[in-house]
């Protein structure tokens, strides 16, 4: 069966148990599919028999394959690529969320909250692995919490990035710090990615549980009580923050500082924590306080959203650049 020519379409692609809901381009002669987004282009490899829909039409793709998975920068894309030009106009942007890699207290199973604990070797490796998964997605701005485990994760992930831009922490805490960290070369500036650190993205403050062992606390207070402290929406742990309280500052920060950047077409990465990210995901995915209870985030796995005209479209976890197929997918 021949692959059907279909150029510059937007729709849903079904293949291998995944669906991709995005603009894509099928090149009949070359038997490859391209997923096109803001400023970058992905050739989707090894796409076997499947079907896709677009504009109400269902089409069959047979054995479309390519051995390469590659992304071209907008800068290196042909200027007559109208799809990329039009997606730029609509100010789409990528939003990457990443929970920090394993910390020394994750390893010891201790409540951590706002205690500033660094990564383990495994956490370092997770951050590097995460960086590989997003190495093809251009990033314009990085936001991290004020805690070192999130900052280490962001920095280590960026060591893997294809563009080799240098992430630079912004020091705006005082006029002197700002002035003493200025860069005087426009050229160098272009090769930097600003990293904004914000306490509002910190892990939720775990109150009097900070430093306690999770298992021992469950043995002492009961599994249900500890689950309520850890996962309920509005019940805070003793003298700590509930998820609701954490959401108030994390989502407010997101709305005030990150959403305007996405709306202006900037690709943003946020490196933060289990609960600050759960509260942001609750906002992005419009989850209810019931639904957020069962939302768990793994350490060091990046999640991709596309921001489009004020809406957030969840794309799942980018696959590594060597993995054929998708940089963004959701299991059906
Ligand atoms: O200890 C913490 O700070 C958090 C994240 O590791 O734990 P929990 O999974 O209980 O929210």
Image (spheres, rainbow, N blue to C red):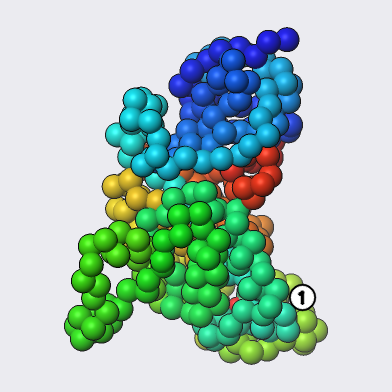
Q: Name the foreground residue: 303 vs 284.
A: 303
Q: Name the foreground residue: 27 vs 19.
A: 27
Q: Quadrant of residue 328?
A: top right
Q: Name the foreground residue: 28 vs 290.
A: 28
Residue 243, above or below 57 = below
Does residue 7 appear left or right of residue 227 in this picture? left
- Residue visible at 29% across and 47% down in the picture: 264
Q: Name the residue beneath numbered marker 1.
A: 223
- Residue furthest out toward the right: 219
Q: SS of the residue at dot 1?
A: helix
| Residue 239: image location, x then y, percent | 52, 86
Q: Quadrant of residue 192?
A: bottom left
| Residue 80: image location, x then y, percent | 34, 25
Asked if residue 48 can be seen in this view, the reply is: yes
Does residue 82 appear left or right of residue 320 in this picture? left
Asked if residue 292 can be seen in this view, the reply is: no
Residue 42, above or below 233 = above
Q: Quadrant of ligand 1?
A: bottom right
């Amino acid at each position: 069966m021949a692959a059907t020519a279909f150029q510059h379409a937007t729709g849903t692609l079904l293949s291998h148990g995944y669906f991709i809901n995005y603009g894509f381009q099928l090149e009949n002669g070359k038997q490859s599919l391209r997923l096109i987004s803001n400023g970058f282009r992905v050739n989707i490899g090894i796409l076997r028999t499947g079907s896709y829909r677009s504009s109400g039409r269902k089409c069959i793709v047979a054995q479309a394959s390519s051995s390469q998975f590659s992304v071209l920068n907008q800068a290196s894309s042909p200027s007559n690529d109208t799809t990329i030009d039009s997606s730029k106009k609509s100010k789409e942007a990528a939003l990457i969320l990443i929970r920090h890699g394993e910390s020394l207290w994750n390893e010891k199973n201790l409540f951590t909250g706002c205690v500033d604990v660094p990564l383990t070797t495994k956490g370092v490796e997770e951050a590097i692995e995460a960086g590989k998964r997003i190495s093809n997605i251009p990033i314009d701005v990085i936001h991290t919490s004020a805690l070192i485990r999130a900052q280490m994760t962001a920095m280590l992930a960026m060591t893997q990035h294809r563009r080799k831009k240098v992430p630079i922490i912004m020091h705006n805490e005082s006029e002197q710090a700002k002035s003493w960290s200025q860069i005087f070369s426009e050229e160098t500036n272009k090769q930097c990615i600003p990293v904004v650190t914000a306490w509002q993205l910190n892990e939720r403050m775990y109150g009097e549980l900070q430093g306690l062992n999770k298992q021992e606390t469950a043995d002492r207070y009961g599994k249900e009580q500890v689950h309520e402290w850890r996962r309920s929406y509005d019940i805070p742990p003793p003298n700590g923050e509930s998820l609701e309280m954490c959401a108030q500052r994390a989502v407010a920060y997101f709305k005030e500082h990150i959403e305007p950047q996405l709306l202006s077409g900037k690709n943003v990465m946020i490196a933060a924590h289990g609960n600050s990210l759960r509260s942001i995901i609750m906002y992005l995915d419009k989850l209810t306080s019931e639904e957020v209870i069962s939302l768990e985030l793994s350490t060091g796995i990046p999640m991709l959203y596309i921001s489009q005209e004020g809406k957030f479209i969840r794309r799942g976890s980018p696959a590594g650049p060597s993995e054929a197929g998708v940089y963004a997918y959701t299991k059906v």
